[in-house]
Amino acid sequence: MKLDKAQVTSILKKYGIVFVLFLIIIFLTIVRPEFMTAKNLFNVLNQTSIYGIMAIGMTFVIISSGIDLSVGSVLAFAGVVTASFAQVATATGKMFPNFGPLPIVVTILIALGIGSLCGAINGFLVAKTNIHAFIATLGMQTIARGFALLYTGGKPVSNLSAGFEFIGSKLWGVVPVPVVIYAIVIALAWILLNYTSFGKSVFAIGANKTAAAISGIKVQRNQILIFTIAGLCAGLAAVVFLGRTGSAHPGAATGYELTAIAATTIGGTSQTGGIGTIWGAVVGALFLSVVKNGMTLMGIHAYWQQIVEGVIIITAVIIDMRKNMKKV
């Protein structure tokens, strides 16, 4: 079947990032054959899990025409508090010397609760005070990071219970547990965004908040829920982070919010709102992880990696703006 120019253009717009990712993978396989080893590929997926979970939460926010600059700091805050209740009895510098580690389920709930609470506060500020999400979440970014530093005195929290060792381990010695958690989050978020009335409301609010309100959508309530989901994802990312590193630090996850925004934008979620997909965020997060992994294998300095990521972000936003200008 022969495709006309309009069809080819449509396919490239929708799946262009996939084609670019495919080309990068081919290039890295040729230049660095070790890239395509099972060990390295699972390492890439493992690295993607934290960014990807945060990007999924960010997708809901950006589709609704918002932004969340606080998720990195929320991850750090949720991480240090959760870690403090998961330290083993013999831990060096234990925060609560006479207090044993709580069950893993309870500590996970603490992380999810802190993340959700911070997100709900963001949503409340945006919905009820009408201040821009940029300002509300920038304030939360500073507050959460300050609480993390205050709570720990600027010191790391380590020696966690065996439950977190499992979260950082591999099932059957092959599949990383963080990847399994990430896959479950992808599935749940995809269903929520595409097959529920709430998901339809997210798109409607992002496309035109006034029209959404007139049509009967409870805009303020949904905005609070949207930011709560982003916070919940940050809390879950904190759990995965603790599993992978075995410790928490109040300065951790600095800049992770920008990576989450970049992954979402690269995946096609429009900064103007009303457009976006879960699979796009997943591909965007994978794209960034592959690029970072490839640059590491090629011996490119970490500082240059930051510069490349910045260029990728700017390029993605420019492409998004050009697409939306053509629609007007």
Image (cartoon, helix red, strand yellow):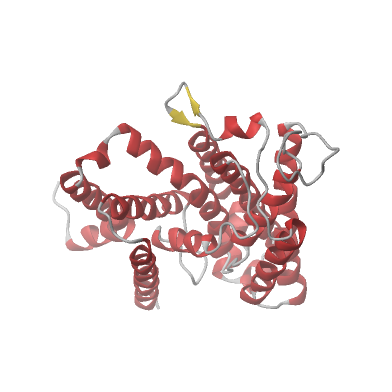
Q: Position of residue 45 (x, y in %)?
A: 41, 41
Residue nearest the viewer, comparing 299 with 317: 299
Q: Residue furthest right?
A: 98
Residue nearest the viewer, comparing 306 with 218: 306
Q: Could you tell me if residue 167 is visible in this image?
A: yes
Q: Quadrant of the C terminus?
A: bottom left
Q: Residue furthest front?
A: 92
Question: Residue at left 52%, top 40%?
Answer: 182
Q: Could you tell me if residue 275 is visible in this image?
A: no
Judge left or right: residue 191 versus residue 328: right
With respect to residue 65, does 23 lie above or below?
A: above
Q: How many marks?
A: 0
Q: Position of residue 66 (x, y in %)?
A: 59, 68
Judge left or right: residue 229 versus residue 41: right
Q: Position of residue 300 (x, y in %)?
A: 29, 59
Quadrant location of residue 201?
bottom right
With respect to residue 318, does 215 lie above or below?
A: above
Q: Position of residue 37 (x, y in %)?
A: 27, 34
Question: Residue at left 17%, top 58%?
Answer: 4
Quadrant location of residue 98?
top right
Question: Residue at left 72%, top 45%?
Answer: 82
With respect to residue 186, does 129 lie above or below?
A: below
